Image: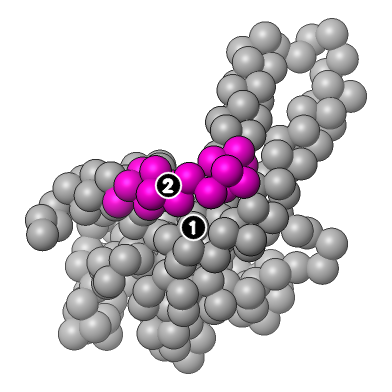
Amino acid sequence: MDYFLQTYKKRCKQEFKELGFCACQRNQYRVINDVFQSFCLHRSCYGNNATIEFCVLPLSQEYRIDKSTCGSMHLMNFDNSCEWFSYVSDDVESVDICIEEMLSYAKAHLIPFFEKSTNCPDAYNSLKIFDRKNEIHFNEYIKLIMALKNQEYILAEKHVENLIIQCKTAYENNKMACGEDISTDYINKIEKKIKKRKKLLQLIRNKNYVYIQTWLKNNELANLQSLGVFL
């Protein structure tokens, strides 16, 4: 194990173990109420900068969650910035400073965010701080599942509509870029996804709430099992 990763994992254990976070490779994660929270070290391939990526996910999502699951949001998103933390790879002091800067930032911003996001209702509201102007699809799927779990069906309906728009927009953009070279597999994948979202939209509009809640519960049980958490 290289010095950066070894030191980072040691410091994470010192700082976050008491908060219930467990380690899995570069990932730190915990399950709390009906959400999964994690953060993960991400270093650039150039070996001169790094960041910590993170997520808060509803356990009831249909996609598998395991101990290595993380997200694409990263620390500087709290400041609406794309910047990472710099270091010199062969300079131990520089690496130490970088790690401490990241962990200090995590304690100041990420941990309070996690503490405000310990269940689906609170996490749904906390995620609003990352909403970006003219980017209606940011965290859209996560918010959809949380809205369904919270039985906020009017909100969920809007999220599904936005996801369908997102799929159609992605298809049109790729079709414009690739022309006749657009792959059949991609077309089938997009069509399948749109069909699935339309089915869910119809379930919401038809008020098939028992079916929806049963589906969410089954997803949650499957993800708890994947994470080794047994009720």
Q: Quadrant of residue 163?
A: top right
Q: Identify which residue is drawn at 70% across, 69% down.
A: 131
44 vs 21, left or right, is: right
Task: Indicate which disc, 1 or 2, sits on the residue closer to the N terminus.
Answer: 1
- Provide residue 51's location: percent of width, then percent of height: 51, 67
Labelled pair 1, 2 in contact (Cβ < 8 Å): yes
Q: Secondary structure at mark 2?
A: helix
Q: Main secondary structure of the magenta part?
A: helix
Q: Is residue 57 above or below residue 102?
A: above
* Between 59 and 78, the one nearer to me in the picture: 59
Residues in magenta, as a range = 201-217
Q: Quadrant of residue 58?
A: bottom left
Kindly identify which residue carries mark 1.
148
Is 16 part of what is drawn in magenta?
Answer: no
The answer, for residue 51, to whether it is visible in the render is: no
Q: Identify which residue is drawn at 53% across, 49% down.
A: 207
